[in-house]
Amino acid sequence: MARQDKVTNVIRRTAGEVKRYRIIMRVLPITMAVLVALLAVIYVISLLYDNYGSFTVTVNKMDNAKYALTLSETPDFANPSGRLNCKANKEITNIDGSTLPLDLDQIDGSHNGENYVAYTFYCMNAGTAEVSYEYQVVVSNMSLDIEKAVRVRLYVNGVYTDFARTKTDGTGPEEGTTEFYTERTVTRGQFDNFAPGDITKFTAVIWLEGNDVDCIDTILGGEFKLDMVMNILGVGEAA
């Protein structure tokens, strides 16, 4: 009798194992599909980041063609676009900002140095009506507190300002800089009475300031990406 009970228990245990096996085999393909989809999303995000580089400029379009801004890497607008992109070396080291070239605003398009990003471009009113527009330079990606040592220089029609995060101790701006407008917004500005054919010239320069007390080993491997977005705020009379 004992032997029969033992045989029965073995059969029951085996049947349970078979049931669990069948459940696993049904769930496993679904789990694998979810993992593959997740990896695909991560890959796409990584691909987009690589394609859009370290500094991206976009203009938000309006439905009415009379009110339009367009971008170009050259003042003749031979290749106008609604999006511009500047790529940079993936690995850079800190530098002394005072050693940056003096002609940063004199070279069109991307003209990165070994350890800095530099990009010159133009924004034109391509519509037929006068407009007001706003530009914002925003931090779209940052990690490992690297933004604490980053400097952003923005030339607007030849006049530049250096921007930096507020000092870590909260006592004010870094020497020779203007504080970021907010934690995620470097700066913002506005142009009024921007007539058809009017052009604004911009140059953005990004580097790690070696003289910053926050430029330490812990930021090694950090990432920093800026976007510049332009929006039409108001419109004038149609031409």
Image: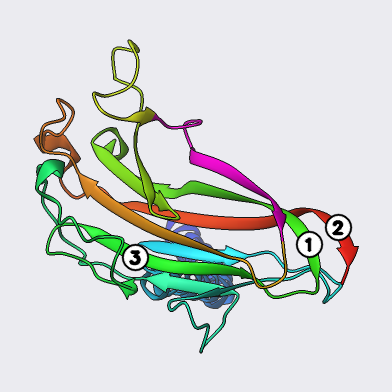
Q: CA separation, marks 3 and 1?
A: 27 Å
Range of magenta residues: 179-194
Quadrant for the C terminus in the image:
bottom right
Q: CA separation, marks 3 and 2?
A: 31 Å
Tell me residue 138's x, y (percent).
Answer: 49, 47
Q: Is residue 4 magenta?
A: no
Q: Secondary structure at mark 1?
A: strand
Is the stretch drawn in magenta largely helix, strand or loop? strand
User: Which residue is farthest right?
Assistant: 237
Q: CA separation, marks 1 and 2?
A: 5 Å
Q: Is residue 188 magenta?
A: yes
Nearest to N terminus: mark 1 or mark 2: 1
Tell me residue 62's x, y (percent).
Answer: 80, 67
Q: Secondary structure at mark 2?
A: strand
Which one is in front, 50 or 182? 182
Quadrant position of residue 113: bottom left
Q: Which mark is residue 130?
A: 1
Residue 147 in the figure: left or right of residue 79? left
Q: Residue at x 29, y 35 (%)?
A: 145
Residue 42 visible from this viewpoint: no
Q: Are marks 1 and 2 in contact (CB under 8 Å)?
A: yes
Q: Residue at x 53, y 83 (%)?
A: 77
Nearest to N terminus: mark 3 or mark 2: 3
Which one is in front, 198 or 67? 198
The residue type indicated by label 3 comes to Tyr
Which one is in front, 10 or 72? 72
Q: Say which of marks 3 and 1 sits in front.
A: 1
Disc 2 packing (10 Å; few <14; some 14–19; many ≥20): some
